[in-house]
Amino acid sequence: MLFTTPEPDRRELEVLGQIEGLKLSLRHQLYEPRRWYGPLRRLTAARAIQGSNTIEGYDARLDDAAAIAAGEEPLDADEETRRALAGYRDAMTYVLQLADDDEFAYSAQLLKSLHFMMTSYDLGNRPGRWRPGTIYVRNEETGEIVYEGPDSERVPGLAAELVGFLNEPEQDHDRLIRAAMAHLNLVMIHPFRDGNGRMARCLQSLVLARGGVLAPVFMSIEEYLGRNTQAYYDVLGKVGQGSWHPGNDARPWVRFNLTAHLRQARTTLRRVKETERLWLELEQIAKRHGYPERVLVPLYDAANGFRVRNAIYRAALEETGGEPITAPTASRDLQRLADDNWLAPGGEKRGRFYTASSDLRRLRQAIIDAREPRDDSDPFGG
């Protein structure tokens, strides 16, 4: 027996409708090819990778997360964090490949394969294999056991039930709820020795990606979960009550996820509008100074707080659809932007990087200052 999906009530259907409306607005905003789409998509993916791994204690700056996602070395992240983020990147890359696969089907082996990609940097995690014994989740600060997973003998059967649930035909409006329930059941089964939280969030993203109205990277709520970790733990604790209790009411978890989708969609829509405005400003700068169009990529990254490096500039340019350039060309571009006071150099030799100058920061801040007040109200309050 798994946790049962609650039938949406009137208020939940209303919130689902609001989320759908926001996602359709996003789809219209992102439908036509725009030069800023690639950089925004790259930044959004980095935020998702950073958010999901932060929950597990793998803290990395956003530009380091983006560097690892591009297969480049980070500036600050330690080796364990780098390997954890790289593993998560590999699993999520596979998820994106599966998003529109016509022959796709969920299976226990798929779950194991995603786990292997995610955790194979440490064979002690038993990557790609179910856990062999009892598992406990502890409060890192107190050492107190806050959750005990079901007996390991039950894991294969429970995983098979989860796969069966995921392969059932979908009903109207239930993709977001189905994805939330996939996350809940996997994290409560806790089938692996390590990486269960990351796997549950990865699975949720996969369910969302399958047939979604948006590009998969814009469907994720992993950034939101990373920014609201305590609330995320609190609702899991409320629903789980310390051990495997699949008869418990999952509605608080569903509502938490719908709230996350609503707020994340609002944030993403705001970022789309701000990215378009920023890009137009950067285009005007490039036009005034006679810069090649490609330099909009490092200017955009720097304006968003990245430390821009030669290798990352070149990787980002290719990732976002630009023509490849050589390392010397990239160096000349970055130095020219620094000479004209749009970038500020830092670091030495192989550690050389560039950040936003005061002028570029002011331009970005003016866009931030023009934001409308954010709606953080509880859609289920009152």
Image (spheres, grey):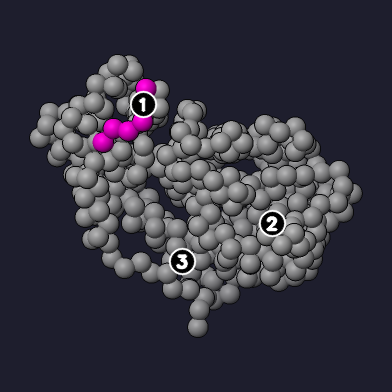
Depth order, front residue of 53/283 = 53
Q: Name the residue under label 3.
A: 17
Q: In the drawing, does residue 369 fall left or right of residue 306?
A: left
Q: Name the residue under label 2.
A: 140
Question: Looking at the picture, how far across and down is residue 56, in whole percent?
Answer: 62, 49
Image point 77% across, 48% down: which residue? Answer: 191
Picture quadrant where residue 178 is located: bottom right
Q: Is mark 3 on a helix, strand or loop?
A: helix
Q: Is residue 346 covered in magenta?
A: yes
Q: Name the residue under label 1.
A: 348
- Looking at this rendering, what residue extends furthest in the left direction? 288
Query: Is residue 98 visible in this depiction of the protein?
Result: no
User: Between marks 1 and 2, how big is the CA–CA gap?
Assistant: 38 Å
Q: What element carries label 1?
A: loop
Q: Is residue 306 covered in magenta?
A: no
Disc on res. 306: none
Looking at the figure, which quarter contains the N terminus? bottom right
